[in-house]
Amino acid sequence: MAEQEKIDHVFTYNPMLKAVYRFGNIPVSMILALYIIPFLVNPSSRTVDILFFSAVVIILMILNSFFYKIWKIVPFTIHAQEDRLVCSDFFLSSRKVELLYSDIENLKGGTFSGKFNGIMIAESMEKDIQIGFFARIENARLLEAILINRSPQPVYEKVTTLLKERKEELRKK
């Protein structure tokens, strides 16, 4: 096998995207709360009002659960080193997470699942670590390539097979 190139790259988000990923739910939650308050102040027994109230509450819960997941697994600084990822700058946390490439058991979401968008996740079930990132991170393709090439052989084969299948599907269209 050819000798692999030394790796030492830092991946970050631009400040605007960082703000959106961190605080994007706040203005939307406030707007949705404006629809909830009148119902709480003056409850209605009309079915339409109850359905509308329920829909707003469900949307609010889904939105905030999505942002909670982002806050838990998406670091805003990823340092790709020779044998590991060092992740820091999590929301409201000073923790640092290290994920060895050899510990990666699964790459899923976004490009790793044959999609163009979405959160991409590298996970190690054994170490109970999930690291997520979006395609909007600076040099995302390089980070994806590093993860695919440095992950264990079964993970590498699974992802590359999926990407080849996706490429063939796109050629047929």
Image (cartoon, helix red, strand yellow):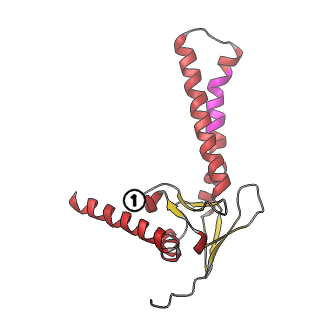
Q: Whole-percent x and y of residue 136? A: 52, 62
Label 1 packing within 10 angstroms: few (<14), some (14-19), many (20+): some
The answer to whether residue 20 is left or right of residue 169 is right
Quadrant where the N terminus sits is bottom left
Outermost residue on the bottom side: it is: 3
Q: What residue lies at 55% left-to-right and 69% top-to-bottom? A: 138
- The quadrant in which residue 31 appears is top right
Magenta-highlighted stretch: main secondary structure? Answer: helix
Q: Whole-percent x and y of residue 63? A: 59, 40
Against 33, residue 149 (above or below) is below
Q: What residue lies at 76% left-to-right and 55% top-to-bottom? A: 92
Outermost residue on the left side: it is: 172
Q: Whole-percent x and y of residue 48? A: 52, 14
Taking the magenta stretch, the answer to whether it contains residue 33 is yes
Taking the magenta stretch, the answer to whether it contains residue 65 is no
Magenta stretch, residue numbers = 28-37
The answer to whether residue 143 is left or right of residue 43 is left
Image label count = 1
Secondary structure, mark 1, is loop
Q: What residue lies at 46% left-to-right and 58% top-to-bottom? A: 110
Against 11, residue 5 (above or below) is below
Against 64, residue 10 (above or below) is below
Q: Nearer the viewer, residue 173 or 122?
A: 122
Q: Whole-percent x and y of residue 98? A: 68, 70
- The quadrant in which residue 60 appears is top right
Q: Which residue is mark 1?
A: 114
Amino acid at dot 1:
Gly
Q: What residue lies at 48% left-to-right and 72% top-to-bottom? A: 148
Quadrant where the C terminus sits is bottom left
